[in-house]
Image (cartoon, grey):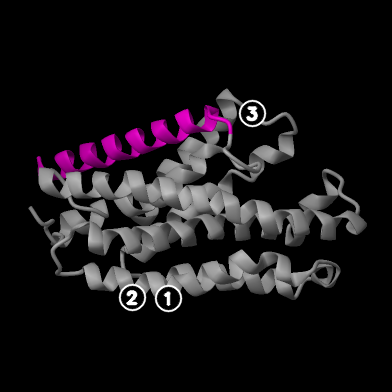
Amino acid sequence: MALRGRGSLYVSVVATLAALHIVLSYAPPLVGFRRMSIVMEPLEGIIAGPYLGFLAAAIGWIGGRFIRPDAFWIENLFGIAEAVGALGAGFLISRRWYLTAGIYAVLLAAFLVHPLARHIPLWTLWDTYLGFLAVFAAAFLVRRLQGAKLGPPRLVPAVALVAFVAVELDVMVRVFMLIVGGLYQVYPIPIEALPTIFVLGAIQTPLEAAYSVAVATVVGVPVLIGLEKSRILSWPIPQGLRDGHARVED
């Protein structure tokens, strides 16, 4: 009975998060090219943990593109970055920051050693470098949550940093797919045009990250506090059900 109840909870949470992800795929982006569903990445990871969060984001990615696909088919493949962002957020909130850092480091290193990297101004990825450093700051703040009474003063900076890491990890996955994965050839994008594209991205992607972090924090913190007060479940769910979670301040 307990196992069946736990399984039903998993299914319900994944279905709810995936449905929200799909709905937000309809909304036009505030700025840039990524869909508004990117704001769900950190929340999926924080609430559902790394693996269920990845599953929810993956279902949301596939469902959103199935219902409203991008005009150019290759664009739909980049949605996998949303699921990886949720995975990274889930590892961070589960205090397995080293896995998020490892994924990030492998993707970044693969890009930097790629022959095309010499054609791209490396400063244009300034926000992704900050995202990598933010992994360690987020890990510190998340660790402070353990055993503490949770309220906005503790949750706001932790959620904001986790959200920033998740969205920037999303960017790093897209860069990896475009350059290392060779998808620039599918468009096709001339090598000579890559510097211009990355310079524009140096302005555009931080703006996307800024509103994603803002939405995830403003919406996410009350939701997390509400879940704690409800005592229905603790987050991230698998860990919360296994060993409990700090209670929120009344």
**Residue 69 badge:** 3
x, y percentage for residue 129? 59, 71
Q: Position of residue 183 (x, y in %)?
A: 77, 51
Q: How far is the residue under mark 2 from the one under mark 1? A: 6 Å
* Mark 1 / mark 3, whichever is N-terminal: 3
| Residue designated by label 2 | 140
Question: Looking at numbered disc 2 in the image, what kind of residue is underneath it?
Answer: Phe
Q: Is residue 20 magenta?
A: yes
Work out which quarter of the rendered image holds the N terminus and state it.
top left
Mark 2 in CB contact with mark 1 (< 8 angstroms): yes
Look at the image and tell me whether residue 55 can be seen.
yes
Query: Is 103 on the left or on the right of 90, as rendered?
Result: right
Residue at 60% from the left image edge and 65% from the top image edge: 127
Residue type of the residue flagged with mark 3: Pro
Position of 224 with respect to 32 (left or right) is: left
What crowding class fits label 1: few (fewer than 14 Cα within 10 Å), some (14-19), or many (20 or more)? Answer: some
Disc assigned to residue 136? 1
Measuring 14% from the left and 69% from the top, which residue is drawn there?
Answer: 147
- Badges 3 and 2: C-beta atoms under 8 Å apart? no
Main SS, magenta residues? helix
Check disc 2 and report its element: helix, strand or loop.
Answer: helix
- Considering the numbered disc 1 on the image, is that residue within a helix, a strand or a loop? helix
- Magenta residues (range): 1-28
Taking the magenta stretch, the answer to whether it contains residue 7 is: yes
